Image (cartoon, grey):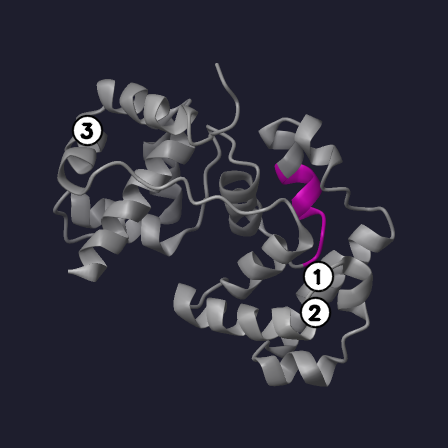
Amino acid sequence: MYQSLTRDTLPTAVTQLCADNVLMRSLVDEFGPPPLWQRTQSLETLVHIVLEQKVSLASANAVMQRTKKLCPSFTAQKFLLLPEEGLRDAGLSERKVSYCRSIATAMVEGDLNLAALRKCSNEEVMEKLIRIRGIGPWTAGVYLLMAMRRTNAWASGDRALVVSYAQCTSTDVIPTYAQLDEIALQWQPFRAVAARVLWHAYLSRQAK
């Protein structure tokens, strides 16, 4: 089975997921197939995901755009040269400045090699990323999903996923992150596709 989702493999993966799951099939019928939502395998992407921690996507994107103006090339070396005051003015909290600097430092010092992660299993990628201060399971999971586009990646701890699942199953009780992690096991080996279907349903409902 293919390990990464592409524009060519995503439709096939959606079909395979829906063939075995009534909920996923009903969501695709109602909202259509989900977008690929791909990001680059880069420091820029990791910083963007850190900025998305516990805030809205729109808010994080606004801060990210201001940060990119400060660091157009977005290399780890250039990012570390940015003054903290400038990053704070761009909208980063003191904690997120520290997190982003920690990731950039790990890349400069060789503790984090993003290219080398391509040869690693999902579990190995998670382990290597979570070692870095500022990267937790959710951030690492989103990187696996969006940047590496691994077919069975999962973003544990994602608020939109648990809310979307509750909406899609017409329940008044939003599942805990651990409960949804358990439920998601039934979507293997296409958990990343299921996440996209749930995100797509969530955003489609918000747009109404």
Question: Is 132 included in the stretch rendered in magenta?
Answer: yes
Q: Main secondary structure of the magenta part?
A: helix
The residue under label 1 is which amino acid type? Answer: Phe
Magenta stretch encompasses residue 60: no
Q: Return the x and y of residue 73 as percentages of the image width and height.
A: 72, 62
Q: Which residue is mark 2?
A: 71
Looking at the picture, how far across and down is residue 71, in whole percent? Answer: 70, 69
Q: Amino acid at mark 2?
A: Cys
Quick check: can you spot residue 20? no
At mark 1, the secondary structure is loop
Q: Residue at x 42, y 24 (%)?
A: 9
State the residue in front, 126 or 195: 195
Instruction: Report the front residue among 122 and 67.
Output: 67
Residue beneath disc 3: 25
Q: Is residue 93 above or below residue 21?
A: below
Of the image marks 3 and 1, the number of the one nearer the N terminus = 3
